[in-house]
């Protein structure tokens, strides 16, 4: 071959099996740049007596940072303080791991008012989505 190899591009409306190569390649590059092996998953669940899960909080911790990635409560159990308790239990475990900074992303149609009530503040507002939808990055710190 005498020169640069020709590069072809293709665009798809679905994820192809090759998509895992992007994840693996990015993961490898990130691992070389930062100690991501220290990131630890964290989850908390609410169950009824039958052990059926009616809600949960999922995220991760890394150093003094805790990211709350998902909170969900079964619709018929909402407005009973379950999400608040899930978040407090989740954050309590994160604090026992040494976390003092808590952050999350939420849309305006989700629960920003709940997070505000728990001491989170909007640090960034991303108002570019259709239908007036806004994404917030919210943070709460226990550092002095």
Image (cartoon, rainbow, N blue to C red):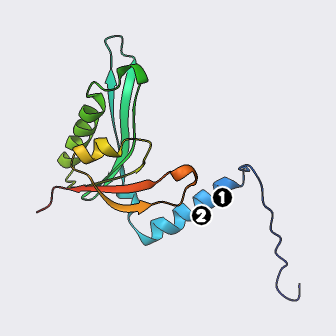
- The extreme left residue here reads 144
Q: Quadrant of residue 141?
A: bottom left
CA separation, marks 1 and 2?
6 Å
Classed neighbour count for the residue bearing mark 1: other residues with Cα under 10 Å, few (<14), some (14–19), many (≥20): few
Q: Is residue 8 above or below residue 82?
A: below
Q: Quadrant of residue 92?
A: top left
Instruction: Residue at 59% x, 63% y: name it.
Output: 25
Which residue occupies the foreground of this view, 87 or 110?
110
Instruction: Reply above or below: 98 against 113.
Output: below
Task: Give the image location of residue 9, x and y in percent.
Answer: 80, 68
Mark 1 in CB contact with mark 2 (< 8 angstroms) = yes
Disc sitting over residue 21 in the figure: 1
Q: Measured from the top left, where is residue 6 in percent x and y? A: 85, 78
- For disc 2, the neighbor class at 10 Å (few under 14, some 14 to 19, many from 20) is few
Residue 25 numbered mark, or none: 2
Q: Residue furthest right?
A: 1
Badge 2 marks a residue whose secondary structure is: helix
Residue ID at (37%, 41%) = 111
The quarter of the rendered structure image containing the N terminus is bottom right
Point 33% across, 29% down: residue: 45
Residue, far front? 132
Vertical side of 91 occupied by 24: above or below: below
Q: Is residue 98 left or right of residue 126?
A: left
Horizontal and vertical percent for residue 38? Answer: 34, 57
Q: Secondary structure at mark 1?
A: helix
Please report the residue visible at 19 percent of the width from the left and 53 percent of the height from the top. 98
The percent coordinates of residue 136 (x first, y second) are 40, 55
List the single residue furthest toward the bottom.
2
């Amino acid at each position: 071959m005498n020169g640069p190899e020709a590069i072809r591009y293709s665009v798809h409306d679905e994820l192809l099996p090759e998509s895992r190569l992007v994840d693996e390649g990015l993961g490898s590059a990130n691992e070389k740049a930062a100690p991501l092996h220290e990131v630890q998953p964290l989850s908390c669940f609410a169950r009824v007596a039958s052990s059926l899960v009616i809600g949960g909080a999922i995220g991760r911790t890394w150093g003094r940072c805790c990211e709350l990635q998902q909170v969900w409560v079964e619709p018929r159990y909402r407005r009973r303080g379950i999400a608040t308790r899930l978040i407090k239990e989740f954050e309590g475990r994160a604090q026992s791991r040494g976390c003092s900074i808590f952050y999350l992303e939420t849309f305006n149609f989700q629960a920003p008012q709940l997070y505000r009530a728990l001491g989170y503040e909007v640090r960034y507002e991303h108002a570019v989505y259709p239908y007036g939808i806004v994404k917030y990055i919210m943070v709460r710190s226990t550092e002095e």
